[in-house]
Image (cartoon, rainbow, N blue to C red):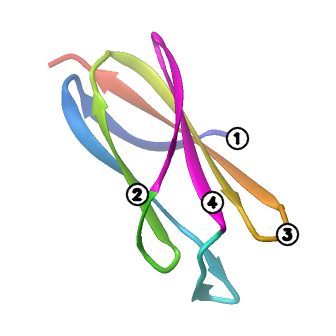
Amino acid sequence: MENMYADFYLNETGQIKVEYKKNNVYVNPSTVKIKIIKPSGEEELEMTNEATGKFYKYINFDEPGKWTFYIEATDTAGNKQIDKYFVWVLEK
């Protein structure tokens, strides 16, 4: 299932944020990566940890069209959680 995040305009910078909790308490996975798939290709980056359990990445939306994000969190045991989101980048 795809989750819609938001719409952005061409050449706008947006922030993609995720949070992780266990038993209603914020926790840090060992790694949190974001795979960005935009109309011209893809790249994989580490997300920035702003506080326990809270991660973000600033993205410059420099191409119109559908952008898809796979956010992968891995814990110390090697278990992975992958969430999929998409946005539409619109021309003004």
**First along the sequence among labels 4 and 3:** 4
Identify the secondary structure beneath mark 4.
strand
Foreground residue among 3 and 64:
64
Identify the secondary structure beneath mark 3.
loop
**3D distance between C-alphas at marks 1 and 4:** 23 Å
Q: Mark 2 = which residue?
A: 56
Q: Percent x, y for residue 59?
A: 33, 38
The amino acid type found where label 3 is placed reads: Ala
**Decide: marks 2, 1 in contact (CB < 8 A)?**
no
Residue density around tag 1, few if under 14, some if 14–19, many if 20 or more, within 10 Å: few
Task: Determine the residue positioned at 31% across, 16% down.
Answer: 63
**Mark 2 or 3, closer to the camera:** 3
Image side of residue 45 versus residue 51, left or right:
right
Main secondary structure of the magenta stretch:
strand
Mark seen at residue 31: 4
Q: Percent x, y for residue 54?
A: 46, 71
**Decide: marks 1, 4 in contact (CB < 8 A)?**
no
Mark seen at residue 77: 3
**First along the sequence among labels 2 and 3:** 2
Quadrant that contains the C terminus: top left
Q: Is residue 83 above or below residue 38?
A: below
The amino acid type found where label 4 is placed reads: Thr
The amino acid type found where label 2 is placed reads: Tyr
Foreground residue among 31 and 66:
31
Task: Determine the residue positioned at 40% across, 57% down.
Answer: 56
Q: Which residues are magenta?
A: 30-47
Task: Determine the residue positioned at 45% across, 63% down.
Answer: 55
Q: Percent x, y for residue 32?
A: 59, 56
Q: Mark 1 = which residue?
A: 1
